[in-house]
Amino acid sequence: MALQPAADEKAHGRKVAAMFGRIARWYDFLNHALSLGQDHVWRYRLVRHVRPAENGLVLDLAAGTMDVSTELLRQYPSVQVLALDFSRPMLVQGARRKVQGKREGRIQPVQADGRLLPLPDNSMDGATIAFGIRNILPREECYAEVLRVLKPGARFCILEFGTGSRRVWKGVYNFYLDKLLPLIGKVVSGDSSAYRYLADTIKSFPDERRLAQELIDAGFTRVFHLPMLSGIVYAHIAEKEG
């Protein structure tokens, strides 16, 4: 008997969580190495656009090892960050390395599903998700939940790769996705399937215009995007109507 879509999506979520659990130990190193350190710049530019209220609450969805969470505190020292992720090993890895000293109590890691946020309506002064929206199916359920928990006028800021179906740098980037990314991932982490999955999701991800339309259809207003590194990466910004 064929699985219903909901069952397929639950299975997908479990598969993704298990995959990130396997590579949690190597995740930060590979992020920095594979981007040649550009991931720091991308996160900085993403967080600049959040603009939360003073002493506000910010949701960092698919927080992983909490690089965006710590950048939020660096740029907005008065806020508190709720770092939510479906993979507990990723949160544990991040908390061990990054949530200490002045950050303790300012970042709260919580294991949760992005399609069912354990938060009240109109409670967040901003929300981010970095390289995570393509792992959530269906995306529309995540958009609806983020829209529900944001305060009027607050922003949802997405950092994501551009579609890998478009040729960038005369195909050099596409070769990198197809061949080098899985190979490097296998050599360093021993898990080629995880980095093959990442490459495949990048290649199948919608382009910036389609993603903007998804956000508009979900009910966000003032949606815009900013290309980085020749469109390999985009910051997408969407506001909840004030």
Image: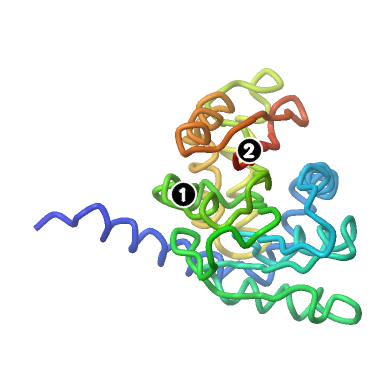
The residue tagged 2 is 238
| Three-letter amino acid code of the residue under disc 1 | Ala
SS type, badge 1? helix
Q: Position of residue 38 (x, y in %)?
A: 82, 44
For the residue pair 16 and 112, the one nearer the viewer reads as 112
Outermost left residue: 1
Which percent across, then down, holds residue 73? Answer: 85, 63
Residue named by callout 1: 144
Instruction: Give the residue drawn at x 90%, y 81%.
Output: 101
Mark 2 element type = strand
Q: Are marks 2 and 1 in contact (CB under 8 Å)?
A: no
Q: Could you say which quadrant of the image residue 8 lies in?
A: bottom left
Q: Is residue 49 left or right of residue 144?
A: right
Give the residue displayed 71% in from the left and 21% down from the top.
Answer: 169
Amino acid type of the residue that numbered disc 2 sits on in the rendered structure: Ala
Identity of the residue furthest to the front in this view: 242
95 with respect to 223 (left or right):
right
Up the image or down, 82 lies above or below 62; here it is below
Q: Is residue 100 above or below residue 238?
A: below
- Quarter of the figure with residue 116: bottom left
Q: Determine the residue located farthest toward the top in the rendered image.
A: 170
Q: Decide if residue 152 is on the left or right side of residue 54.
A: left
The disc label shown at residue 226, or none: none
Q: Nearer the viewer, residue 115 or 14?
A: 115
In which quadrant is the C terminus drawn?
top right
Alpha-carbon span between mark 2 and mark 1: 13 Å
